Image (tube, grey):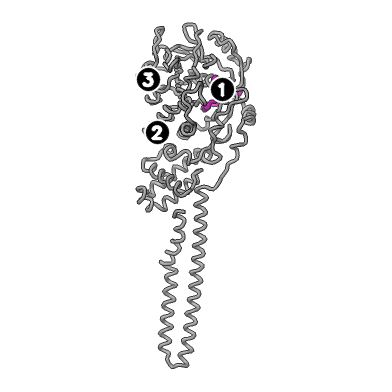
Amino acid sequence: MGNGIFIGGGGPDYSQGQTLSLKYANRHGLIAGATGTGKTVTLQILAEGFSNAGVPVFLSDVKGDLSGLAKAGSADFKLHEAFTNRAATIGLKDYSYAAFPVTFWDLFGAQGHPVRTTLAEMGPLLLSRLMELSEAQEGIMNIAFRVADEEGMPLLDLKDLQALLVWVGENRAALSLRYGNVSVQSVGAIQRQLMVLENQGGTQLFGEPALDLADLMHIGADGRGRINILAADKLMGSPRLYATFLLWLLSELFETLPEIGDPDKPKLVFFFDEAHLLFDDAPKALVDKVEQVARLIRSKGVGVYFITQNPDDVPEDILGQLGNRVQHALRAFTARDQKALSRAAETYRPNDRFSTIDAIRDVGVGEAVTSMLEDKGVPGIVERTLIRPPSSKLGPIDETARRAAMQASPVVGKYETLIDRESAYEILKARAESAAHDAAEAEEAAQEQSSAQRDFNAGRRYTGARVGRSTAQPRRGGIGNELGKAVGNAVLRELKGTTGRRIVRGILGGLFKGR
């Protein structure tokens, strides 16, 4: 078991150990089964096994049960006797209780360290998916991100994007000539979706300091990998936000980590719970991206394990890459369920001792049908397996224990304080203030020029009157007076009218021009 993770006991009497090989643990996996069949416990014992092997883990705690990993189980637990009996049955001689090093994370900053990213890091594709934008609206989102890059305006949080979209709307004519049609209606629709995202908690997700991926890969002085737990019970109220965040994190790992080939054990194992949320109504471009990440990220030492109720929730091209499988019971109450059960059974290498389809339907709680990759990456023969009991606490820990774990975390204090550095919003705000200042100065100059013209005209009238009395040429002076008055009035009307507005617009237009 030194080169693998003990999953449980197989064979007719459950005495044959079933092990997940660390060498092939980055070939990904699947944990499937109906509600209440034991998926959470399987996830818990896998996280314990990887941690003991010195492999950091990232997982989401959808029901709040997995926080128990931070605390050891105890003999006064009601299932203590059942656990020890099961350990004896499957040949787990050194079974004992233990706590594991845990780092708690929370997008909302309540049940763990705040975890954030920036809009620029998430990118227009995932952001459009998150907001359920149409193709035309996604195109405008791409234009906005392109302009932000060209104008040197960092997109960090939601107010940056909201300000930039105003900029795009004001410059839609010029941008349409260069990038394609930009409509006010589409810009308005994106702004409304941003407001919805803000109400769902997007304000907490986007900003700085952004998550440093190295903080997910800590290994303690005792050689155990840290288990990173994302509090997702509240987050599941916004399923699209949950799925998009995890996909972003997976993509960041893929794009950031270096190639290392096939290591002796993974650098990180990533568990994607409620995986069906990732693929429900997903556009083909997004599914293709997930397939690409799943296919290539293993060479970067990352194993990805999807947890879902039914294997059919995962697209076939991705399902074919999941070599390590733990299949809990599937119930077949309808014709559709029967077909799903048959398809699930067909993906396993058969065992002469039993029918795979019957085994998947009949296994009890705490049992599963398993198949792990063997030498040279060959799928193992399917086996009915009694899953080993966890060493950590089964169920959630209390708030006091959670806070103590957070205070002992290696990242305590790093992400708690929000940083709001200069970005698109501040840059556009500064341009607006500068334009307003220039416009005020232009108006003041126009008023001074108008006042000077009135004084000049008044002087002309006074001079004309004196000349009329001394030269006996009153009518010529009167003509000059009237002409000067007409010119002055015309200049004043222009400054107050169309030309004056053009001057002010020209100054204000600086807000919507490039650097």
State the residue lying farthest toward the front. Answer: 260
Q: CA distance from mark 1 to mark 2?
A: 32 Å
- Precedes in sequence: disc 3 or disc 2: 2
Location of residue 405 with respect to 507 vertically, above or below: above
Q: For mark 2, does the 10 Å Cα neighbourhood hold few (<14), some (14 to 19), or many (20 or more) residues?
A: some
Res 340 label: 3
- Residue type at numbered disc 2: Leu
Range shown magenta: 49-70
Q: Are marks 1 and 2 in contact (CB under 8 Å)?
A: no
Location of residue 23 with respect to 475 vertically, above or below: above
- Residue type at numbered disc 1: Gly
* Residue with the mark numbered 2: 286
* Residue with the mark numbered 1: 54
- For numbered disc 3, what is the local secondary structure? helix
Q: Residue at x 48, y 77 (%)?
A: 454
- For numbered disc 1, what is the local secondary structure? loop
Relative to 192, 211 lies left or right = right
